[in-house]
Image: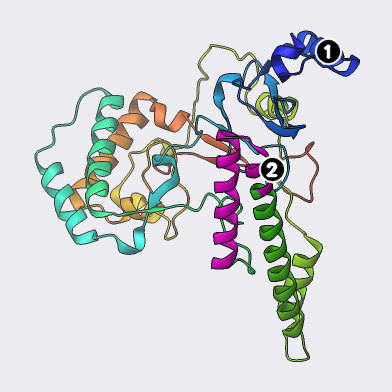
Amino acid sequence: MVTTLTGRTKTDVRGTQLFDTIVDKDYVNLNDGSTTRLKLVNGNVQKSSPDVTFVTNDIALDFIWKVLNESLGSDHLIIKFTTANCCATDADNKKRNFKKAKWEEYRRTLHAIFSVLVLASDPQEAYNQFINAVNSAADRYIPTVRMCTDPLRLQKFVPKPYWNSDISRAVAERRLALVTFRKNPTPNNLDLLQIKVAFAQRIIRRAKRKAWRQFCNTINETISTVEMLRRMRWIKGYRLPKTYIDEDTANRLLRSLTPDYTSSRKPKFTSVNTTLESSITIQEFNRAIKAKDTAPGDDSVSFSMLKHLPVNGKHILVKIYNMFLVSGFVPFQWRQAKIVPIPKASSSTQSIPEITLDSQNG
């Protein structure tokens, strides 16, 4: 079995230990049988796969594994494995850009919709009618902007400062020589590959030295303190560590927010305050709208969208509020919240601050 995984002709103690670990831990091998190492010995090509990739069986189907046509001068080929699925959808990476909203068109459209709208008698259905109308107008007249999901630019490829066209040409010739050797592994093709590898390494080292001298020459008495600190961090290779929330910490956070069991009885609220029991007025609604937007909840309605409602739209929303007040009903949009944990690099995983995004209509 070990020889099948690695392509070797014998099984040693290390291979046996590796195989036992695979069986005990229930790991899955991602290798597809492709050769990961090429070596020419006495005119004979030795192809093997000593570089294996193991993952747990619950995530094995989420990865794409392949061997690249690049060795960087080694006899081992580079292996690339990426996740096959993406957690965030395109809609999750967008938000409404209220700075470029067309509020007049937004208001006129909603005025026309609410002028002919017949509210349902059911409170939940009436609230859904209002939310759907507001979001339909917002989708037309409030553009969206893509949110930055990589603020540190860790996923964006940026070439090294010393990289130039000569290096690109040398690397391309090295890869072409590797392709030729893999198709026809002869001593002459191996010599050509080694020549191209040595030439690429030599030209890269030369470019690195030149770029380093230029970098050092820019450090003088005129450089600012902020720029100097930034360069010192770059020299030391300092990067902000990525925070990771393990499963136990995530479960503790969820249990602290939502217990495993709650009573199914509905709470009863009683009040003798006549002011609280009176109907909501349009003046109270206008005073309750905040001037500054915050992140909306599950209904995607922000304070700006409520502030720029037409007069008939505000009266309809106040009417819906009074329906809730009389019947004691709470729409499901108000009972749902988005909880976003925000781990900090300086804090421990035992204490994770979080923010809750709930409906701004409630």
- Please say whether residue 251 is visible from this viewpoint: yes
Magenta run includes residue 321:
no
- Could you tell me which residue is drawn at 31 percent across and 63 percent down? 100
> How far across and down, in percent of the image, does residue 24 sit?
80, 9
Question: Which one is earlier in the sequence, the residue at label 2 or at label 1?
Answer: 1
Please state the extent of the stretch shown in magenta in the rendering. Answer: 165-191
Counting from the top left corner in percent of width and height, residue 63 is at 57, 27
Type of amino acid at the residue the image marks with label 2: Pro
- In this view, the residue in front, 269 or 28, is 28
Image point (82%, 16%), residue name: 18
Work out whether residue 330 can be spotted: no
Residue bearing the label numbered 2: 353
Locate the C terminus by quadrant: top left
Label 2: element kind:
loop
The residue that disc 1 covers is 11
Query: Residue 228 appears in which quarter of the rendering?
Result: bottom right
In the picture, which quadrant includes the N terminus? top right
